[in-house]
Amino acid sequence: MLGRLLHMARLMCQSNEWSRLARQVFGELIALDTTHESGDTTPAAELLAHRLREAGFNSEDVEVVGPGRGNKNLVARCAEVAGAGQSYFSLTSM
């Protein structure tokens, strides 16, 4: 999964527009305190969910879920590139 994300990040940085957007999103994520001791992953999950919806993901395919109010996770579903089935993307706290 990490390899895929790094590959996507490299591809995004190949054009100036994608590079600007990637820096903006990564900057927003880095500014959030998601540490286990004092932070919360929910704002990061909500930020990425909002970005995915803005990019055209259906709302029903993007969820911020968790058992409590804090440290929720992002789950996003999208059609596979090859066509059949579904692919899943998950941002989870560890």
Image (cartoon, rainbow, N blue to C red):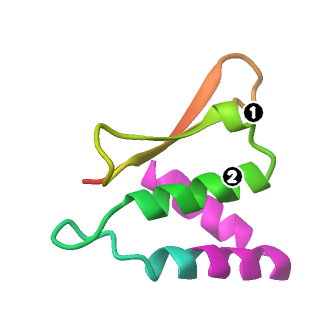
| Of 16 and 90, the residue lying toward us | 90
Compared to residue 7, the image places residue 25 above or below, namely: below
Residue 49 percent location from the top left of the image: 60, 52
Say whether residue 16 is left or right of residue 25: right
Magenta region: 1-25
Say few, some or many: other residues with alpha carbon within 10 Å of mark 2 (under 14 / 14 to 19 / 20 or more): some
Q: Secondary structure at mark 1?
A: loop
Q: Amino acid at mark 1?
A: Val
Instruction: Say whether residue 31 is left or right of residue 41.
Output: right
Between 1 and 92, the one nearer to me in the picture: 92
Alpha carbons under labels 1 and 2: distance apart: 17 Å
The image shows residue 72 at horizontal and vertical percentages of: 37, 48
Q: Residue at x 31, y 54 (%)?
A: 70
* Residue beneath disc 1: 81
Query: Which residue is disc 2 drawn over?
Result: 52
Q: Quadrant of residue 55?
A: bottom right
Q: Is residue 85 left or right of residue 29?
A: right
Query: Which residue is at 25% across, 71% downward?
Result: 35
